[in-house]
Amino acid sequence: MFRDRCSCYTLYKEAYISMINERMRTLTNKTKLTFLALVSTGILGACGSQTADEEQSSSSQVSSETTETDESSSESAASSEETSSNSATGQGINEQEFDVSLDDAVAIYNENHPNTSIESITFDEDSGKYEYDFDGFDDTSEYGLTVDAATGEVSDSESDTEDDDDDDSNEALTLDNILTPQEAMTAALEEVNSGYVDEWQLETDNGMTVYEISIEDSQEDDDNIVLNAETGEIVER
């Protein structure tokens, strides 16, 4: 601060020096001393005031820069969080590839429940993971199995003895010569011309194996397209 004041004093000295010399020639010794004291006080006061203003301005600038930095960091964090969220849930399964194919998942089901028939297969997302959910049966029991689409890990394997009073008749899926899930999803999206697939299911309808494709954000808001799993022909919309 002392150095700043000295620098300030130097700036003012040249401005006052000629005026002081002229004035001093006309004053008595006592008056000269009084005048010099007043001039010095005025110069130093002006320097001190300017220095304080500069310090206040500098402090305000630092505070403003800090605020802008904090706001930028907050916006960056919000953008990162939004990006993360979209990565997890925003992309349709029609745009993704999975390490475990439908054929792989069927083979895993058959390893866990041999000599049974598959009634339906559903592919969707659960708790951040994509999974194949199987429903199967034999003459005495019904079976359930979930296969992780990324790892092939099996979970929720279960069986339940059928109730003789249950009038529901199980119908086995025919999985020979059917479209792949990707082919079925492409056909369904071409039908609606918009949206993305968030779930598909393979089941039997009147003896026909069909894909039911669930589409989000289509022109009709939400669409369920049912198509022949062998030919791709649209059965129901």
Image (cartoon, rainbow, N blue to C red):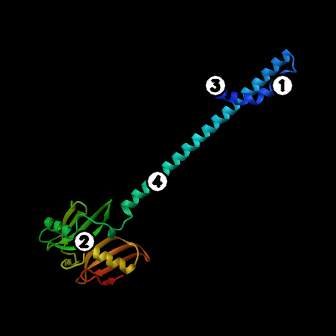
Can you give x and y, in whole percent of width and height, for residue 222 in the image? 41, 74
> In the picture, which quadrant includes the N terminus?
top right
Residue position marked by numbered label 3 in the rendering: 2
Amino acid type of the residue that numbered disc 1 sits on in the rendered structure:
Glu
Is 80 placed left or right of 153 in the picture? right
Height in image: 71 above or below 158?
above
Residue 121 - label:
2
Of tags 3 and 2, which is closer to the observer?
3
Q: Are marks 3 and 2 in contact (CB under 8 Å)?
A: no
Q: Earlier in the sequence, mark 3 or mark 2?
A: 3
Of tags 4 and 3, which is closer to the observer?
3
Q: Earlier in the sequence, mark 3 or mark 1?
A: 3
Spatial distance from mark 3 to mark 1, Cα to Cα? 29 Å
Q: Secondary structure at mark 4?
A: helix
Residue position marked by numbered label 4 in the rendering: 78
Is 15 placed left or right of 218 in the picture? right
Residue position marked by numbered label 1 in the rendering: 22
Between 123 and 41, the one lying in front of the other is: 41
Spatial distance from mark 2 to mark 1, Cα to Cα? 106 Å
Of tags 3 and 1, which is closer to the observer?
1
Can you give x and y, in whole percent of width and height, for residue 133 in the image? 25, 67
Of tags 1 and 4, which is closer to the observer?
1
